[in-house]
Image (cartoon, rainbow, N blue to C red):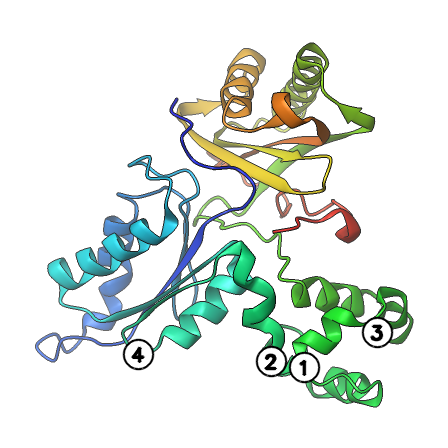
Amino acid sequence: MSCSTPTGHRKVILVGIDSIPATKADAQRQIPDQVGELLREFTDLVEFTADAVYLDVTYNKFDIPFGGRVAKMIKSEIKRHMGLQVSIGMGPNKFLARLAMIQARPNGLVIILPEQIESFLADLPISKLPGAGTITRQRLGELGIERISQLAAAPLQLLTDRLGQRGKNLWMLSQGRDNEQVTPLGQSSQLVEETTFTATTYEREEILDALRELSSALSGRLRRRSLRGRTISLRVVYPDRRQTVRTQRLSDFTDDFPVLLQSANDLLECTEACIIGVRELGIGLAGFSGEAVEQLDLFSAVELNKSQAV
């Protein structure tokens, strides 16, 4: 598989439909299928929400390493094939992609690069953060926190003492960190195996040994549950706590250890793991046939203080 996509951050696009041609009175019901078919030409990681569509184009079918170029192509193609005006936001995660899309409206395109996150968020009010309801904003206001930049600068311990886990979650978002994955319809359930090294690992053989153990454990869990999936993901956390996620859609459903291991090895080649070292590894399988498993957000078990630094 080709690996020209840069590592270090994801490229998530959110497409919001602004207009519907007047000649299509009931087009609203048809749009999701039409848009979905077009978007899947770029990536299989397409997730519909009530009002927009997310795509993860970090690794895309055209092997384009520049997310901004993909976003422009999508906007142009939707206009050309469907006559629709859309607003598109792109960022290193779903949270930032949504903020960018909102700013892009109407009929615009806004891209947030990793180096722009702090300045983009700085002057925004706390209300822009998911989960910052009236009571939460009131409690933060008592601490003199009204802007995202103020929240980002606040001591984490103070926020967790005042708001518990919600305080930690909001603090992470204020840093521009969001690990929520783009989850295609029918792939909301997934099984994950992870490992954390006691110290940064640089040895290729040690990394490959860990992948063998993870693939074997994942295969065993799949077979015990009579599950076969076809979308495999590899997550790598680097020594500086950056993380990258690589995803591959298999040609067929599988629970087979050799297939999982080979795919994981292929995805590993699309990371910097064997160059700059690894602290954590994780393998996930989604897109199951037959009976679904319980909801397991990909790699959500990772502690928030070890989350992605975009």
Q: Position of residue 233 (x, y in %)?
A: 54, 33
- Dot 2 crowding, Cα within 10 Å, few <14, some 14–19, many 20+: few
Q: CA distance from mark 1 to mark 3?
A: 17 Å
| 80 on left or right of 85 | left
- Nearest the viewer among 257 and 12 is 12
Q: Nearer the viewer, mark 4 or mark 1?
A: 1
Question: If you read the primary sequence from the N terminus, does the residue marked by circle 4 or circle 2 appear first?
Answer: 4
Q: Which residue is mark 3?
A: 163
- Dot 1 crowding, Cα within 10 Å, few <14, some 14–19, many 20+: some
Give the residue type at disc 1. Arg
Q: Nearer the viewer, mark 4 or mark 2?
A: 2
Q: Which residue is mark 2?
A: 123
Q: Which residue is mark 4?
A: 106
Question: If you read the primary sequence from the N terminus, does the residue marked by circle 1 or circle 3 appear first?
Answer: 1
- Nearest the viewer among 189 and 143 is 143
Q: Position of residue 76 (x, y in %)?
A: 19, 59
Give the residue type at disc 2. Asp
Q: Nearer the viewer, mark 3 or mark 4?
A: 4
Give the residue type at disc 3. Leu
Q: Which residue is mark 1?
A: 147
Question: If you read the primary sequence from the N terminus, does the residue marked by circle 2 or circle 3 appear first?
Answer: 2
Q: Position of residue 272 (x, y in %)?
A: 58, 28
Marks 2/1 in contact by CB < 8 Å: the verdict is yes
